[in-house]
Image: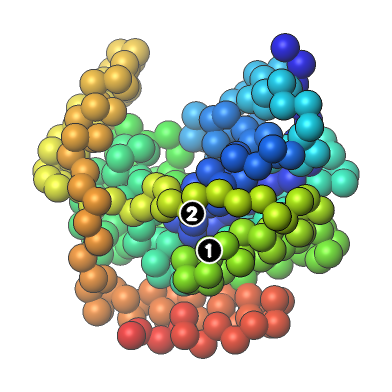
Amino acid sequence: MSHFKPNFFILGAPKSGTTSLYSYLSDHPEIVMSNPKEPHYFSTDIENGGIKSLDEYLACFDGSRKSAKAIGDASTLYLYSKVAVREILKFNKNARFIVMLRDPSEIAFSFHQVALRVFGETETEFNRAWDLQEERAKGINIPDGCPDPQLFAYGKIAKLGFQVERLLSLVDPDDVHFVFFHDFKERTEQEFLNVLRFLGLDSSFDTKYDVHNPTRRIKYPRITQLVNRAIGLKKKVGIETEFGFASKVHQANIEEKPLERLNQDVHKKMKNFYEKDLKLLSSLIEKDLSAWRFVK
């Protein structure tokens, strides 16, 4: 089977609607999306189980859809990565980029749930995980099952102004399309059609606008903590870990209920942390983001 070479990339941010957009794009007859959704081939500076070889990467793109004009990769840590965009441009100098943006406090809070399920986080209380960032940056209090401490830098993961500034230093702004999570949620069809127009594709296409991969709450945090500690201990003593059982436990231990509201004290800390970065982002994309800068 032949394979395609991707020509557009959904760079992130995580927990900002990328899975829903990926799903809608996958249904379009002129688009082939990566399988899996997030190969993370180009984010070589972040260890998160991404694909390592070019042959394996290209095999993520099914070449059987001959009508395809747009080939997409939706790895959501590319925006956070220091090297991914530069490496993508070496691979395809004509690449185009989609960036989904959300209130960074919400990204960080939701990403903590991902870290608990996927990256071996053992601190189940987000307030504590946020406060641990400084220690963890120095290599302290990092769980043994963690593939890369950068995945627990919740503040930096959602520092969108810095990340967008780096992106626009490398890429022509005309080759970047921004989608805002709130707009995408409230006006899904309109925002999706805008993406199709950006990609130069048939915008008369219709699809079902179901929500995919909503933030899910862990029912029993203690169970998640114990499973992740057990995985970390096995890694520490050099035992090859089969993740099938752990994955099933994590899957059974989640429920599709809204996350509890952020603790007001940590929310204020986060807003202070992001204030300068949000002013930068606002100036870069010429959009008023004051609603993201204050605790509601």
Q: Which of the 4 image quadrants contains residue 295?
A: bottom left
Question: As shown in the figure, which amino acid type bears the numbered disc 1?
Answer: Thr
State the count of labels.
2
Residue at horizontal 48 percent and vertical 54 percent from the top: 209
Q: Residue at x 14, y 47 (%)?
A: 219
Q: Amino acid at mark 2?
A: Tyr
Task: Say if mark 2 contacts mark 1, CB within 8 Å.
Answer: yes
Q: Quadrant of the N terminus?
A: top right
Vertically, is 40 above or below 140?
above
Give the mark, 2 or 1, whose residue is nearer the N terminus: 1
Nearest to the observer: residue 216 or residue 134: 216
Q: Which percent across, then down, holds residue 291?
A: 47, 85
Task: For label 1, count other residues whose C-alpha is less than 10 Å away and answer few (under 14), some (14-19) or many (20+).
Answer: some
Residue where numbered disc 2 is placed? 209
Cα separation between marks 2 and 1: 7 Å
Nearer to me, 195 or 51? 195
Which element is circle 2 on? loop
* Closer to us: 179 or 120: 179
Instruction: State whether residue 54 appears in this view.
Output: no
Residue marked by disc 1: 188
Q: Is residue 149 left or right of residue 125?
A: right
